Amino acid sequence: MERARTLLQALSDCDADTVGHLQRTATTVARVSAALGWDEDRRRWATFGALLHDIGKIGVSPSVMYKPGPLSPDEQAVMRDHVNYGIDLVTAYGFPAIVARIVREHHERLDGSGYPQGLAAEGISEEAKLVMLADIADAMLSRRPYKQALTLDDVRRALSAGAGSMFEAELVEPVIQVLAATPPEE
């Protein structure tokens, strides 16, 4: 846990908002994986993967991270590179391969439209599929410089629309149920 704290503190020094997002995503993953009956080890590493999935944003310029409008193609490439930088960080800090795999796969989609590898369906770990959904749900529920927060009903509709094509259908409702039972932050 100390290694994760060190990385999160470094990210917090330049981007406290992302740290809050990582913590909320990890909480959702911990609760959903417990509700799904995953064993303790699997829950632990899925939660660590969620806690560190965007750690590579340490290497993204604040001008790109907090740009209020659409990103240019070059800025999108810089933003997408957070995945590779994150893999390097969790590997250098000695986290298990499953944590690096979650970091690598959290932007992949079942239909192969994600990045960085364009993996599809069975090529994506179940842990990353859960982190993917928790990540997207939290992003939708959060206000960002370039968008307003959505309601939980809006998030449910969006995730349900992508169930089976972009997202693991069996995970959508458990994520929504956990979010619905989670008290809002003050």
Image (cartoon, rainbow, N blue to C red):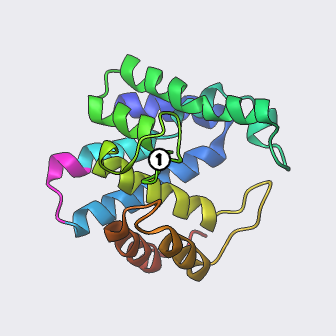
Direction from residue 73 to residue 23 in the image, left or right: left
**Disc 1 on helix, strand or loop?**
loop
Is 144 drawn above or below residue 149 in the view shown?
A: above
Direction from residue 34 to residue 168 in the image, left or right: right
Quarter residue 134 falls in: bottom left
Is 37 drawn above or below residue 102 in the view shown?
A: below
In magenta, the rendered stretch is 37-43
Is 86 drawn above or below residue 147 in the view shown?
A: above
Q: Residue 38, image x and y in percent? A: 18, 58
134 falls in the magenta region: no
Q: Residue 154, image x and y in percent? A: 61, 78
Direction from residue 93 to residue 109 in the image, left or right: right
Depth order, front residue of 150/106: 106
Q: Residue at x 57, y 69 (%)?
A: 185
Q: Residue 132, image x and y in percent? A: 45, 53
Depth order, front residue of 110/135: 110
Q: Which residue is mark 1?
A: 112
Q: Name the outermost residue toward the bottom.
A: 153
Q: Name the outermost residue toward the left.
A: 39
Q: Residue 75, image x and y in percent? A: 77, 33
